[in-house]
Image (cartoon, helix red, strand yellow):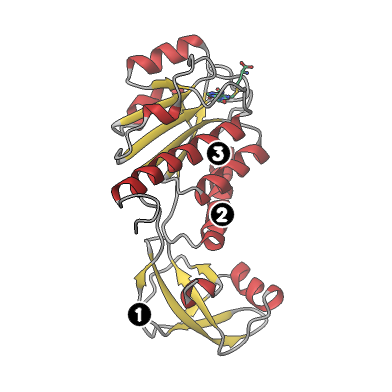
């Protein structure tokens, strides 16, 4: 682990400029003071979601806030490698969708779009959608802080499945379908795919009509194995499989498992 990676990492919603003091947001300040018990002189890593990060030193700690001052150069942080992965997920009950947002962030997804499908049991009114989205962004930022990732995940507003072709435009488009007749997600990917869209259905699954309609727009139905997974498991599994294929491609290109 490099020195930078071992420091506590915090997201700040502002541009980080050399030498310019930043007052950390309330919740971050509270965590630094009360939970981590850091004090003046300690160093932290700041990132603002653009893929870069900066080391900063704590210069003031009070009951209401913690101030930090950048001391290092702004450097490129860790971001997921290719492919760019975009997840569309049938709306689920709150805690299940929360779980997927957290895990998808750790697995390097670029965007998450909640989708209302024919068999969705959850639907979101516009104002509830706003508050859920804000919650998902918070969850995702916490996962960025924890995982060492320096770039944002885009959490999009919920869409209807019929609007998916409009929104998902990667060159590789997949839809996880438990009846895909053994056509595995793994064999559907090319190791050098640069962008992949993957859709996962709600608890009730996709209807056949939906699969046919998606197929007409270039979404290929793919299997995640012979067992039926819950939506949240299916989403996490699909993302891990996409990463695995990309990883194999990388190892191959570098000349075998020993290559670097
Ligand atoms: N209710 C459906 C299953 C839905 S599972 C039934 O009982 O038949 C929820 C979602 O997870 C599905 O829409 C699909 O996108 C995904 N999924 C679950 N298991 C899968 C598998 N083995 N292969 C591909 N997709 C799967």
Answer yes or no: is residue 176 visible.
Answer: yes
* Residue plotted at (51% across, 32% down): 89
Q: Nearer the viewer, residue 51 or 249?
A: 249
Q: Quadrant of the C terminus?
A: bottom left
Q: Nearer the viewer, mark 3 or mark 2?
A: 3
Residue 254 position in % (x across, y down): 30, 52
Identify the residue position indicated by label 1 in the image.
73
User: In the image, is residue 100 above or below residue 124?
Assistant: below
Q: Nearer the viewer, residue 229 or 225?
A: 225
> What is the quadrant of residue 24 in the picture?
bottom right
Which of the marked residues, 3 or 2, is nearer the chain's N terminus? 2
Which of the marked residues, 2 or 1, is nearer the chain's N terminus? 1
In the image: residue 47, left or right of residue 218: right
Residue 169 position in % (x across, y down): 31, 32
CB under 8 Å between callouts 3 and 2?
no
Which of the marked residues, 1 or 3, is nearer the chain's N terminus? 1
Q: Nearer the viewer, residue 76 or 157?
A: 76
User: In the image, is residue 70 above or below residue 146?
Assistant: below
SS of the residue under disc 1: loop
- Report the Cα–Cα distance between label 1 and label 3: 35 Å
């Amino acid at each position: 682990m490099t020195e930078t990676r071992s420091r506590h990492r915090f997201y700040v919603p502002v541009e980080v400029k050399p030498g310019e003091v930043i007052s950390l947001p309330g919740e971050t300040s509270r965590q630094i003071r009360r939970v981590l018990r850091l004090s003046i002189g300690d160093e932290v890593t700041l990132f603002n979601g653009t893929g870069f990060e900066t080391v900063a030193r704590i210069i003031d700690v009070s009951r209401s806030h913690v101030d930090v001052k950048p001391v290092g150069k702004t450097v490129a942080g860790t971001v997921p490698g290719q492919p760019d992965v975009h997840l569309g997920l049938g709306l689920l009950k709150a805690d299940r969708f929360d779980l997927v947002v957290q895990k998808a962030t750790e697995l390097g997804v670029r965007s998450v779009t909640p989708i209302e499908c024919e068999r969705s049991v959850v639907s979101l009114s516009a104002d509830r959608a706003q508050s859920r989205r804000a919650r998902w962004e918070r969850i995702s930022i916490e996962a960025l802080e924890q995982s060492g990732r320096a770039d944002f995940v885009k959490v999009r507003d919920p869409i209807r499945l019929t609007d998916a072709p409009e929104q998902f435009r990667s060159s590789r488009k997949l839809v996880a379908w438990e009846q895909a007749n053994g056509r595995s997600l793994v064999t559907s990917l090319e190791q050098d795919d640069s962008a992949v869209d993957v859709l996962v259905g709600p608890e009730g699954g996709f209807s056949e009509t939906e699969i046919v309609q998606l197929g007409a727009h270039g979404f290929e139905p793919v299997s995640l194995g012979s067992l039926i997974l819950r939506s949240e498991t299916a989403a996490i599994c699909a993302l891990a499989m996409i990463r695995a294929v990309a990883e194999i491609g990388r190892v191959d290109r570098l000349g075998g498992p020993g290559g670097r």
